C-alpha cells in the first residue's frame, strides 16, 4: 500500500485533530511513550483551553504519517539490513576476519561490559566449539572472545543495534552517515517528507 492509499483509507476514520490520549490510543502506546514520540517526531501540536483544562490538539495527518513510516521501516528491514551490511563491510575493510572485544569497542564506541553483555545474550555471536567459547591465546589465561567479522557486521546491521536508545557518540556519528541511505530506501517506497 502506498502513502496516498494509506492516508485515504485511514483519514476518514479519525477527526482532523485528536487529544494526546486519543493519539496514544491510535498509536497503541502509553502516555509517556506518546509524549516522547510527539516530541521526537515534532507533531503539529496546538494547545486549546477546554472545560476539562488545557489540552493538546494534535494533527491526525502527522500521526498517520508517522504510523506509515514506522510500518514501512518494519517492512523494509531486509532492505535496510542489506544497505547497512554494505556500509559496515566498507567501514570494517581494514580489520582482519577475526575480531576481539577491543576491536568491537573501537568500532562501536561502547564499553567492554556492553559488548560482553551482547555476547552473553547471544546478540553478538562469538566463536565457540562444542558449546565452549573459543578464547584468544594472546590474552592471559586465554581470556578474550573471538568474533568473526561476518558476525560483527550482522550484529551492526541488525534492528537491535539500530534500536539502541542510549547510543554512544561513535554510534551517533555512524547513524548520521547511514541514515541518508535508509531514507533513500523509504523514498523509493513512496514515503514523502523523509
Image: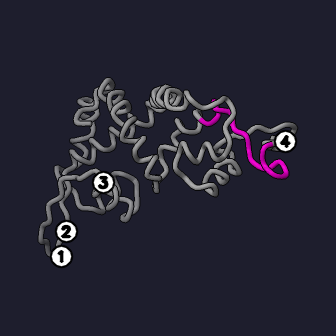
Does 76 sit left or right of 114 as displayed? Answer: left
Separation of marks 4 and 2 at Cα, in angstroms: 57 Å
Q: Quote the CA–CA distance across marks 2 and 1.
A: 6 Å
Nearer to us in this view, 65 or 153 = 153
Which label sits in the foreground, 3 or 4? 4
- Label 1 or label 3, whichever comes before in sequence order: 3
Label 1, label 3: how many angstroms apart (C-alpha)?
25 Å
Pointer 2: residues within 10 angstroms few (<14), some, or many (20+)? some
Q: Which residue is found at the position 40% from the left and 62% from the top? A: 30
Residue at image mark 1: 53
Magenta-colored span: 138-152
Q: Is 17 in the magenta?
A: no
Q: For mark 2, what is the residue?
A: 55
On the image, the x and y values in percent for residue 80 come to 45, 31
Q: Which secondary structure lies at badge 1?
A: strand
Q: Residue at x 48, y 43 (%)?
A: 162
Which badge, 3 or 4, comes first in the chain's sequence? 3
Marks 2 and 1 in Cβ contact (< 8 Å):
yes
Front in this rendered view, residue 90 or 47 = 90
Mark 4 surroundings within 10 Å by alpha-carbon count, few (fewer than 14), some (14 through 19), many (20 or more): few
Residue bearing mark 3 = 40
Q: Whole-percent x and y of residue 126? A: 72, 40
Vertical arrangement, residue 157 with respect to residue 120, above or below: above
Secondary structure state at the residue bearing disc 3: helix
Where is residue 17? Give x, y as percent: 18, 54
Q: Which of the 4 image quarters holds residue 98?
A: top right
Q: Is residue 33 left or right of residue 160?
A: left
Q: Which residue is mark 4?
A: 131
Residue 10 versus residue 86 in the image, above or below: below
Please tell me which residue is depicted at 59% across the width and 33% down the height of the picture.
154
Q: Is residue 140 magenta?
A: yes
Amino acid at each position: 500500500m502506498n502513502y496516498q492509499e494509506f492516508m485515504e483509507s485511514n483519514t476518514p476514520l479519525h477527526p482532523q485533530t485528536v487529544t494526546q490520549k486519543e493519539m496514544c490510543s491510535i498509536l497503541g502506546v502509553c502516555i509517556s511513550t506518546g509524549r516522547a514520540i510527539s516530541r521526537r517526531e515534532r507533531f503539529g501540536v496546538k494547545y486549546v483551553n477546554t472545560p476539562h483544562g488545557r489540552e493538546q490538539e494534535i494533527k491526525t495527518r502527522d500521526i498517520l504519517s508517522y504510523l506509515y513510516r514506522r510500518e514501512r521501516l518494519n517492512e523494509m528491514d531486509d532492505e535496510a539490513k542489506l544497505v547497512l551490511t554494505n556500509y559496515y563491510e566498507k567501514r570494517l575493510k581494514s580489520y582482519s576476519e577475526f575480531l576481539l572485544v577491543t576491536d568491537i569497542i573501537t568500532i562501536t564506541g561502547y564499553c567492554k561490559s556492553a559488548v560482553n553483555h551482547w555476547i552473553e545474550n547471544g546478540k553478538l555471536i562469538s566463536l565457540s566449539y562444542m558449546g565452549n567459547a573459543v578464547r584468544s591465546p594472546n590474552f592471559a589465561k586465554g581470556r578474550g572472545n573471538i568474533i568473526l567479522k561476518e558476525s560483527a557486521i550482522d550484529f551492526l546491521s541488525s534492528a537491535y543495534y539500530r534500536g539502541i536508545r542510549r547510543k554512544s557518540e561513535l554510534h551517533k556519528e555512524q547513524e548520521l552517515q547511514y541514515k541518508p541511505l535508509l531514507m533513500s530506501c523509504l523514498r523509493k517506497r513512496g514515503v514523502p517528507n523523509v
